[in-house]
Image (cartoon, rainbow, N blue to C red):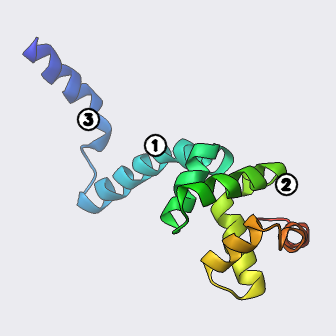
Amino acid sequence: MENKSKQDFSKRRVHLENMNDEQLKTYFWELANKTIEPLIKLAKDYTSPSIERSILLRMGFSSLEANVLVKKVIDHDLISKGAGHIVYRLATIEKVDIRTAGLKLINDEGWNKVIDSFKESHND
């Protein structure tokens, strides 16, 4: 079995034999990037309420606050933008800290500003 494995390895590495260290390094990173591209696409395109709550917890909100924020983000059909992004967006628009922006959203303040800001910039 070991001999077969060595033969297989020898066949699979033929295309690497004439590469120098820099070329091997470049090739490695090309392959690594190709490997993670689908993961990055999934992260950009898909989320879930539990992921969004987790992000909000890391932004300093309590579990109860995170639950309310995620529910309101879903109710406003903005989950694809990310709950943390929504909070950050309002903080940027109103020039307030993240916590203040999140509390405003919990109290149903600022939603129109956030929604309008996405209409203005089509690439977010």
Q: Residue 96, how many percent across, how many down? A: 68, 86
Q: CA distance from mark 1 to mark 3?
A: 19 Å
- Residue under label 2: 76
Please state the total of marks drawn on the protein image.
Answer: 3
Residue 51 or 13: which is nearer the viewer?
51
Numbered tag placed on residue 13 in the rendering: 3
Residue type for callout 1: Thr
Q: Residues within 10 Å of mark 2 (few under 14, many from 20)?
A: few
Label 3: which secondary element: loop
Q: Residue 30, how many percent across, how many down? A: 44, 52
Corner quadrant of residue 94 = bottom right
User: Mark 2 vs mark 1: which is more N-terminal?
Assistant: 1
Residue lying at 46% horizontally and 51% vertically, measured from the top left? 33
Label 2: which secondary element: loop
Classify the position of the C terminus by image quarter. Answer: bottom right
User: Mark 2 vs mark 3: which is more N-terminal?
Assistant: 3
Residue lying at 58% horizontally and 52% vertically, measured from the top left? 53
Q: Residues within 10 Å of mark 1 (few under 14, many from 20)?
A: few
Residue 120 or 74: which is nearer the viewer?
74
Q: Nearer the viewer, mark 2 or mark 1?
A: 2
Residue 31 or 41: which is nearer the viewer?
41
Residue type for callout 3: Arg
Corner quadrant of residue 10 = top left
Side of 40 where 6 appears, left or right: left
Residue farthest toward the top in the current orientation of the protein: 1
Whether residue 42 is visible to the viewer of this picture, yes or no, is no
Q: Residue 40, how many percent across, how many down? A: 55, 50
- Residue under label 1: 35
